[in-house]
Image (cartoon, grey):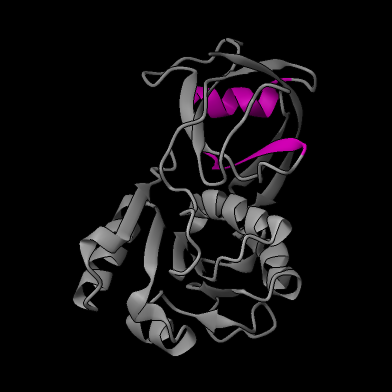
Amino acid sequence: MKHDAEFLNRERVGEDVMLFRLGKPEDFKFLAGQFCFLRVPDVGYKDERGLRRAFSIASSPLEKELLFVMKMSDSALKRTLVEIPVGTTVTLDEPVGSLILPQETATPLVFLAGGVGIAPFRSLMRYVADARTGHRIALFYSSQTPEETPFVEELQHLPDQYQQAAVHITMTRVGEDRKRWNGLTGRISPEMIKGSFREWEGAMYFIVGPPAMATGMKQMLIDMGIQSGRIKMELFTGY
């Protein structure tokens, strides 16, 4: 089933990261963490990947708008999104994806995100906080600099709204400049996870990020003794 959605606005949230807002069609139902295929109208840009691509939904099902966050490139689809006027109709396919919350809440969850891979986790975290689901969650989010990190302030304050969530954001390219960033630095590591989340051994792990980061995180978890059956992973190419 196809859904027509109105393009509402765009916002630059980093040097090469943009947030796009669409009106949510009344019949468009999805679960937090899912993705969908988005098709934009033809305004003259062409490439081999075409004008229909899959993107994670960054908004919660409880929100009135659909949010999509993207690392920008010169692809035909993204160049189109940058230029289409407000009010343009874009087309959405039915949402799909298994990176969703388990029904039971006894097992703690650890989310590992890199770059714009935060999109499905923002959806999940926002939904858990607003719906008060009872899930215990620790988010570890790796980015390069605060200036190119979407949702950073919102996520930092989310534990104030939902005390069963912990948020750990780390930057890899700020060096010793504490005026830019006073939080964690460096890549996500076993020491970071073990030192920040005491229930790490019995948790279910969700990983989303660029292929190299995501596969590296999965191997790190396996080396930590986490069984592969307790690891879910989605890859973001960013193109």
Q: Is 223 on the left or on the right of 136, as rendered?
A: left
Query: At 70% across and 70% down in the image, what residue appears?
Result: 162
Image coordinates for residue 146, horizontal then vertical, percent: 63, 67
Residue 26 falls within the magenta-colored stretch = no
Query: At 56% across and 29% down in the image, what residue appears?
Result: 78
Q: Is 202 on the left or on the right of 109, as rendered?
A: left
> Image quarter for residue 239?
top left
Query: At 49% across and 53% down in the image, what residue appears?
Result: 101
Using the image, determine if residue 63 lies above or below residue 225: above
Residue 71 falls within the magenta-colored stretch = yes
Using the image, determine if residue 136 lies above or below residue 88: below
> Image quarter for residue 131?
bottom right
Image coordinates for residue 18, horizontal then vertical, percent: 64, 43
Using the image, determine if residue 221 lies above or below residue 214: below
Query: At 72% across and 66% down in the image, what residue appears?
Result: 153
Whether residue 31 is visible to the viewer of this picture, yes or no, is: yes
Q: 204 or 174: nearer the eye?
A: 204
Image coordinates for residue 67, horizontal then vertical, percent: 66, 40
Q: Write the start and end of the magenta stretch as one range.
A: 64-84
Using the image, determine if residue 38 lies above or below residue 89: below
Q: 1 or 140: nearer the eye?
A: 1
Q: Is 203 on the left or on the right of 178, as rendered?
A: left
Image coordinates for residue 55, horizontal then vertical, percent: 50, 35
Whether residue 74 is visible to the viewer of this picture, yes or no, is: no
